[in-house]
Protein backbone atom coordinates (compact mmCIF):
# COMPACT_ATOMS: atom_id res chain seq x y z
CA UNK A 1 0.00 0.00 0.00
CA UNK A 2 1.53 3.31 -1.04
CA UNK A 3 2.09 6.23 1.31
CA UNK A 4 -1.00 8.36 1.73
CA UNK A 5 -3.34 5.54 0.69
CA UNK A 6 -5.80 4.61 3.43
CA UNK A 7 -6.86 1.06 4.20
CA UNK A 8 -10.36 0.65 2.74
CA UNK A 9 -11.46 -1.87 5.38
CA UNK A 10 -12.07 -1.85 9.13
CA UNK A 11 -9.35 -3.01 11.50
CA UNK A 12 -11.37 -6.14 12.24
CA UNK A 13 -11.51 -7.02 8.53
CA UNK A 14 -7.77 -6.44 8.32
CA UNK A 15 -7.15 -8.65 11.36
CA UNK A 16 -9.24 -11.54 10.02
CA UNK A 17 -7.61 -11.23 6.59
CA UNK A 18 -4.06 -11.25 7.95
CA UNK A 19 -4.77 -13.85 10.66
CA UNK A 20 -7.78 -15.86 9.45
CA UNK A 21 -9.34 -18.29 11.92
CA UNK A 22 -10.37 -21.92 11.45
CA UNK A 23 -8.72 -22.54 8.08
CA UNK A 24 -9.04 -26.11 6.80
CA UNK A 25 -5.52 -27.50 6.42
CA UNK A 26 -6.20 -31.08 5.34
CA UNK A 27 -9.59 -31.71 3.75
CA UNK A 28 -9.06 -35.47 3.47
CA UNK A 29 -8.14 -35.89 7.14
CA UNK A 30 -10.96 -33.74 8.53
CA UNK A 31 -13.91 -35.81 9.84
CA UNK A 32 -16.65 -33.62 8.42
CA UNK A 33 -20.30 -34.23 9.24
CA UNK A 34 -21.31 -31.77 6.54
CA UNK A 35 -19.56 -30.22 3.56
CA UNK A 36 -20.55 -27.31 1.33
CA UNK A 37 -18.81 -25.81 -1.67
CA UNK A 38 -19.89 -22.79 -3.69
CA UNK A 39 -18.29 -20.65 -6.34
CA UNK A 40 -18.74 -17.17 -7.75
CA UNK A 41 -17.80 -17.23 -11.42
CA UNK A 42 -17.95 -13.46 -11.79
CA UNK A 43 -15.13 -12.75 -9.35
CA UNK A 44 -13.45 -16.16 -9.51
CA UNK A 45 -13.93 -16.98 -5.82
CA UNK A 46 -14.61 -20.48 -4.56
CA UNK A 47 -15.48 -21.45 -1.01
CA UNK A 48 -15.38 -24.78 0.83
CA UNK A 49 -16.84 -25.11 4.31
CA UNK A 50 -16.96 -28.19 6.55
CA UNK A 51 -18.68 -28.63 9.89
CA UNK A 52 -18.74 -31.07 12.77
CA UNK A 53 -22.06 -31.40 14.60
CA UNK A 54 -22.94 -32.23 18.20
CA UNK A 55 -25.56 -34.82 17.32
CA UNK A 56 -27.44 -34.60 20.63
CA UNK A 57 -27.78 -30.83 20.65
CA UNK A 58 -27.73 -30.33 16.86
CA UNK A 59 -25.22 -27.55 17.35
CA UNK A 60 -22.08 -26.75 15.37
CA UNK A 61 -19.13 -28.14 17.32
CA UNK A 62 -16.49 -27.10 14.79
CA UNK A 63 -16.34 -25.18 11.53
CA UNK A 64 -13.44 -24.95 9.09
CA UNK A 65 -13.09 -23.53 5.59
CA UNK A 66 -10.78 -22.66 2.74
CA UNK A 67 -11.17 -20.34 -0.22
CA UNK A 68 -9.54 -19.04 -3.35
CA UNK A 69 -10.99 -15.63 -2.72
CA UNK A 70 -10.25 -12.00 -2.04
CA UNK A 71 -9.57 -10.25 1.28
CA UNK A 72 -13.28 -9.66 1.87
CA UNK A 73 -14.15 -13.33 1.28
CA UNK A 74 -11.38 -14.45 3.63
CA UNK A 75 -12.22 -12.00 6.41
CA UNK A 76 -15.99 -12.51 6.26
CA UNK A 77 -15.68 -16.31 6.29
CA UNK A 78 -13.13 -16.21 9.10
CA UNK A 79 -15.47 -14.22 11.33
CA UNK A 80 -18.44 -16.35 10.25
CA UNK A 81 -16.61 -19.50 11.33
CA UNK A 82 -16.25 -18.00 14.81
CA UNK A 83 -19.82 -16.77 14.98
CA UNK A 84 -21.41 -20.17 14.29
CA UNK A 85 -19.51 -22.14 16.93
CA UNK A 86 -22.07 -23.46 19.43
CA UNK A 87 -25.07 -22.28 17.40
CA UNK A 88 -27.83 -24.70 16.55
CA UNK A 89 -27.93 -25.69 12.90
CA UNK A 90 -31.10 -23.67 12.37
CA UNK A 91 -29.62 -20.56 14.03
CA UNK A 92 -26.53 -20.86 11.86
CA UNK A 93 -28.60 -21.35 8.73
CA UNK A 94 -30.48 -18.10 9.41
CA UNK A 95 -27.30 -15.99 9.64
CA UNK A 96 -27.37 -13.29 6.99
CA UNK A 97 -24.59 -11.45 5.15
CA UNK A 98 -25.78 -8.27 6.88
CA UNK A 99 -25.08 -9.84 10.32
CA UNK A 100 -21.64 -10.96 9.17
CA UNK A 101 -20.86 -7.45 7.93
CA UNK A 102 -22.06 -5.97 11.21
CA UNK A 103 -19.65 -8.25 13.08
CA UNK A 104 -16.83 -7.04 10.83
CA UNK A 105 -17.86 -3.40 11.12
CA UNK A 106 -19.01 -3.33 7.45
CA UNK A 107 -17.38 -3.94 4.06
CA UNK A 108 -17.01 -1.73 0.99
CA UNK A 109 -20.31 -1.97 -0.89
CA UNK A 110 -18.72 -3.45 -4.01
CA UNK A 111 -17.31 -6.28 -1.88
CA UNK A 112 -20.52 -7.34 -0.13
CA UNK A 113 -21.01 -10.20 -2.60
CA UNK A 114 -17.89 -11.81 -1.14
CA UNK A 115 -19.53 -12.16 2.28
CA UNK A 116 -22.26 -14.26 0.67
CA UNK A 117 -19.81 -17.02 -0.24
CA UNK A 118 -19.30 -18.25 3.32
CA UNK A 119 -23.00 -17.85 4.07
CA UNK A 120 -23.97 -20.00 1.08
CA UNK A 121 -21.27 -22.60 1.76
CA UNK A 122 -22.45 -22.89 5.37
CA UNK A 123 -26.04 -23.52 4.30
CA UNK A 124 -24.82 -26.10 1.80
CA UNK A 125 -22.81 -27.85 4.56
CA UNK A 126 -25.86 -27.90 6.86
CA UNK A 127 -27.99 -29.35 4.06
CA UNK A 128 -25.29 -31.95 3.43
CA UNK A 129 -25.30 -32.92 7.11
CA UNK A 130 -29.07 -33.32 7.13
CA UNK A 131 -28.87 -35.43 3.98
CA UNK A 132 -26.18 -37.67 5.42
CA UNK A 133 -27.95 -38.10 8.76
CA UNK A 134 -31.28 -39.22 7.32
CA UNK A 135 -33.06 -35.90 7.82
CA UNK A 136 -33.82 -35.10 4.20
CA UNK A 137 -37.01 -33.32 5.31
CA UNK A 138 -34.83 -30.61 6.89
CA UNK A 139 -32.88 -29.93 3.70
CA UNK A 140 -33.78 -26.49 2.37
CA UNK A 141 -33.48 -26.16 -1.39
CA UNK A 142 -33.09 -22.65 -2.75
CA UNK A 143 -35.26 -23.01 -5.81
CA UNK A 144 -34.86 -20.42 -8.53
CA UNK A 145 -37.79 -18.44 -9.94
CA UNK A 146 -37.66 -17.51 -13.61
CA UNK A 147 -38.04 -13.74 -14.06
CA UNK A 148 -36.99 -13.10 -17.65
CA UNK A 149 -38.11 -15.87 -19.98
CA UNK A 150 -36.40 -14.39 -23.04
CA UNK A 151 -32.92 -14.35 -21.48
CA UNK A 152 -33.55 -17.13 -18.92
CA UNK A 153 -32.68 -14.93 -15.90
CA UNK A 154 -33.76 -16.16 -12.45
CA UNK A 155 -34.28 -14.32 -9.16
CA UNK A 156 -30.95 -15.51 -7.70
CA UNK A 157 -29.09 -13.84 -10.57
CA UNK A 158 -30.82 -10.55 -9.80
CA UNK A 159 -29.73 -10.88 -6.16
CA UNK A 160 -26.15 -11.60 -7.25
CA UNK A 161 -26.23 -8.53 -9.51
CA UNK A 162 -27.38 -6.36 -6.59
CA UNK A 163 -24.62 -7.75 -4.39
CA UNK A 164 -22.22 -7.02 -7.22
CA UNK A 165 -23.27 -3.37 -7.32
CA UNK A 166 -26.42 -3.03 -9.47
CA UNK A 167 -28.71 -0.30 -8.13
CA UNK A 168 -30.81 0.65 -11.15
CA UNK A 169 -32.78 -1.32 -13.72
CA UNK A 170 -30.27 -0.27 -16.37
CA UNK A 171 -27.36 -1.61 -14.29
CA UNK A 172 -29.34 -4.81 -13.77
CA UNK A 173 -29.73 -5.14 -17.53
CA UNK A 174 -26.01 -4.57 -18.04
CA UNK A 175 -25.15 -7.44 -15.70
CA UNK A 176 -27.86 -9.96 -16.56
CA UNK A 177 -29.23 -8.91 -20.00
CA UNK A 178 -32.79 -9.32 -18.69
CA UNK A 179 -35.51 -7.24 -20.30
CA UNK A 180 -33.50 -6.66 -23.47
CA UNK A 181 -35.90 -8.56 -25.75
CA UNK A 182 -39.60 -8.06 -24.96
CA UNK A 183 -39.25 -6.07 -21.72
CA UNK A 184 -42.27 -7.66 -20.04
CA UNK A 185 -40.24 -8.59 -16.96
CA UNK A 186 -39.29 -4.99 -16.09
CA UNK A 187 -41.86 -4.46 -13.33
CA UNK A 188 -41.12 -7.73 -11.51
CA UNK A 189 -37.36 -7.33 -11.96
CA UNK A 190 -37.48 -3.78 -10.57
CA UNK A 191 -39.47 -4.95 -7.53
CA UNK A 192 -36.89 -7.65 -6.85
CA UNK A 193 -34.07 -5.14 -7.34
CA UNK A 194 -35.59 -2.85 -4.70
CA UNK A 195 -36.24 -5.81 -2.39
CA UNK A 196 -32.66 -7.07 -2.51
CA UNK A 197 -31.17 -3.59 -2.11
CA UNK A 198 -33.29 -3.06 1.02
CA UNK A 199 -32.49 -6.55 2.32
CA UNK A 200 -28.73 -6.30 1.96
CA UNK A 201 -28.05 -2.58 2.19
CA UNK A 202 -31.13 -0.91 3.66
CA UNK A 203 -29.79 -0.42 7.18
CA UNK A 204 -26.33 0.71 6.17
CA UNK A 205 -25.29 4.26 6.95
Image: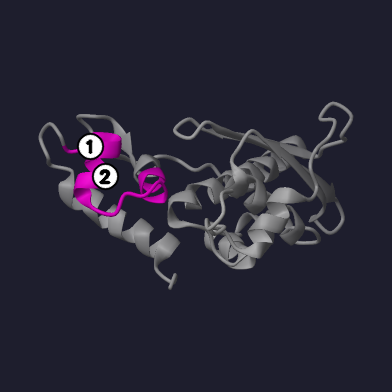
Disc number for residue 186: none
> What residue is pinned by disc 1?
178
Left or right: residue 132 versus residue 3 is right
Q: Regarding mark 2 in the picture, which secondary structure is present there?
A: helix
Q: Regarding mark 1 in the picture, which secondary structure is present there?
A: loop
Q: Quadrant of residue 134?
A: top right
Residue farthest toward the top in the current orientation of the protein: 28
Q: Would you say residue 119 is visible in this rendering? A: yes
Range covered by the magenta-colored residues: 159-179
Name the residue located 87 percent from the left edge and 34 percent from the top edge: 30
Task: Give coordinates of residue 202: x percent, y percent.
Answer: 39, 68
Name the residue nearer the viewer: 180 or 32.
Answer: 180
Left or right: residue 46 versus residue 55 is left
Name the residue located 72 percent from the left edge and 57 percent from the top edge: 15
Q: Is residue 156 magenta?
A: no
Q: Are marks 1 and 2 in contact (CB under 8 Å)?
A: yes
> What residue is pinned by disc 2?
172
Residue farthest toward the left in the current orientation of the protein: 182
Amino acid sequence: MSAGTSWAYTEKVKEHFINPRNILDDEDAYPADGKGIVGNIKCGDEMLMVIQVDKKKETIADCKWKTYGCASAIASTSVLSEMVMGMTLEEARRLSPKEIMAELGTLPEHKVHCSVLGDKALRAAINDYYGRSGNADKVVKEEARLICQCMNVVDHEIEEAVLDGARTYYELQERTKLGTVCGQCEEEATQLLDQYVAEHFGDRD
